[in-house]
Amino acid sequence: MKEYLNRPIKEVIEEHPVVGDILNEFEIGCTTCNVGSCMLKDVVDIHFLPPEQESVLMERIEKAIQGGESREEQTPQPSQGRRTGKGYSYSEPVRMLVEEHDLIKRLLALIPLIVRDIRANGLDRELILDSLEFIRYFADRFHHAKEEEIMFEYADREADIIQVMYTDHTTGRNHVKSIFEALDGNDKETVIKHLQQYRDLLTEHIKKEDEVLYPWIEHQMDNKEIEAMHRAFNDEENRLGPETRARYEQLVKRLEQKLDTREEVQS
Ligand SMILES: [Fe+2]
Ligand SMILES: [Fe+2]
């Protein structure tokens, strides 16, 4: 078993697919995660299961690797529940980030409507530029900057999961750049392609942060560090303008109303 602990999880799942099924039962989505390079031992550490669940998980993985549990014999177990599910409570500063995700998810939910609108009516520059303004200033400058410049200071920046978050942020910025270029060239299909890819990327990214990254980081922090992070978040918000959050909530609301009205007219 020891040798397996230091092997990349993707390799272990490839050799023993039942291990992927067991992890899914514990709501650890390694089979769909694109991190891929985590070691088996990191997977357990990063996902921060309660100790009793962790030992059940490890026993079952060990049994599966030794051939004692095959996919055919496996009896589906009820979901084991996660600490990030109901009942998990984030610290105050982390809750600020999770609430920002909620607003970002409202914008992501509009993307299929924007795509439909482009297909039906062509490129509405104002609508797309307003969406890009939200993405660039709220999702990126306001939110991702807090993660990159403040929160990640409290974790090992070299850890796989942090590196993946940086890569996701950069990929998101590249999608935005491509949308601007395609908009200039009046290239509808490329605008649509990058909007959809941005939506898929951020949907997965937010899920990883809410369920894995944030609990993993805050469980390494003591109360003083949590308080210091909270102060730093507030300072950053004041620096960017205390009205920023409300302004972008209004922007999303306006986009929702605009697209709602268009949907009604079209249906
Ligand atoms: Fe992020
Ligand atoms: Fe985030």
Image (cartoon, helix red, strand yellow):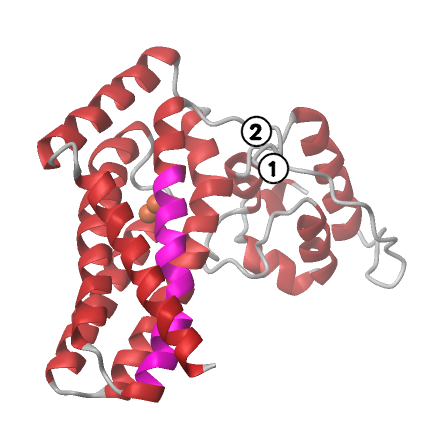
* Few, some or many residues within 10 Å of mark 1 (<14, 14–19, 20+): few
Expressed as whole percent of the image width and height from the top left, the position of residue 127 reads 22, 70
Report the disc number at residue 108: none
Q: Which residue is mark 1?
A: 85
Vertical relation: 114 (above or below) 214: below
Q: Which residues, given as a range, are shown in magenta?
A: 99-119
Q: Quadrant of residue 183?
A: bottom left
Report the disc number at residue 88: 2
The quadrant in which the N terminus is found is: top right
| Residue 47 in view in this figure | yes
Q: Quadrant of residue 226?
A: top left
Give the prevailing secondary structure in the magenta stretch. Answer: helix
Residue at image position (55%, 38%) is: 47
Which kind of residue does numbered mark 1 sit on? Gly
Tell me which image quadrant ligand 2 sits in: top left
Q: Is residue 100 rendered magenta in the image?
A: yes
